[in-house]
Amino acid sequence: MSDTQTPVSLQGAGRMQALRYIWYRARLSLLRGLWFWLTRPGRAGWPFFMDSGARIWYPEKFKAGRRVFLGRMVHINANCTGQVTLGDRVTIGDFGWVQGTAHLSNPGESLVIEDKVYIGPFAVIGFHGPVRIGAGTSIGAGLRLSAQEHDLAAGESIAQQAGKGRGINIGPGCWIGNDVKILDGVELGAGCVVGAGAVVTKPMPARSVVAGVPACVIRMLPA
């Protein structure tokens, strides 16, 4: 085979792999997404994919763009004062849990996930305060994101307190490793890299590389 023929063959192999993936993983997800798209007009763009066991509670508070993929057993509780908004080409991996409230009498604010964000499997996102994840951010498996805190000096048990949250803002183009925890009040600047297993408790500057428990800046990326 000549060198000029090789890229064509590889391109054909790539198409076949994509078609196999769609057949094995996405065909039923697309049918489930079609049902949601038809029964909840205006709540999602097209195509919209919902894998087996995916659920959206309070769909009137949910809005998704085009080519959104919700993996197996993803549960989205959109009970909030604002809305859960997913941009185009957002993926939430298998067994993800998104929750706007821990109690019906105390709903959270809002969640915005911008275009082309990938969130790996087993993520837990609690957004009592407003949460935004910037476009093009990639997040590994096991994310724990909690925009909620309690007033320990309030004089009543924590179980009886109404939660509150300052919110979390993750800038565009961030890269977040596996098993990262991000706590209330954190802002990650654009292009941050967060090492696996880090616990982020305070704001981090743009293009910083952070790691550790609690996380700290270990170096800066070139501009």
Image (cartoon, rainbow, N blue to C red):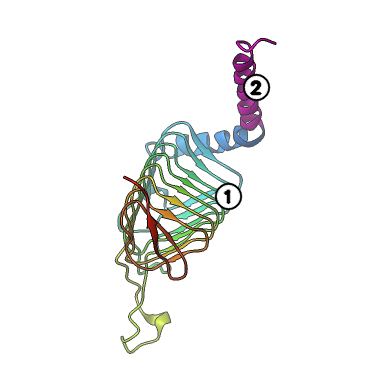
Does 2 sit above or below residue 187? above
Of labels 1 and 2, the one closer to you: 2
Residue 9: say if magenta.
Answer: yes
Identity of the residue drawn at 36% across and 69% down: 105
Say left or right for 202 vs 19.
left
Tell me the CA gap for discs 1 and 2: 27 Å
Res 209 quadrant in image = bottom left
Say left or right for 202 vs 1.
left
Task: Write down the region rendered in magenta.
Answer: 1-23
**Along the line of sight, the residue nearer the viewer: 217 or 8:** 217
The N terminus appears in which quarter of the rendering? top right
Label 1 sits on what residue type? Asp
Label 2 sits on what residue type? Ala
Does 53 sit above or below residue 148? above
Q: Which residue is mark 1?
A: 94
Q: Position of residue 26 (x, y in %)?
A: 60, 34
Magenta: main secondary structure:
helix
Q: Secondary structure at mark 1?
A: loop
Q: How many marks?
A: 2
**Along the line of sight, the residue nearer the viewer: 51 or 177:** 177
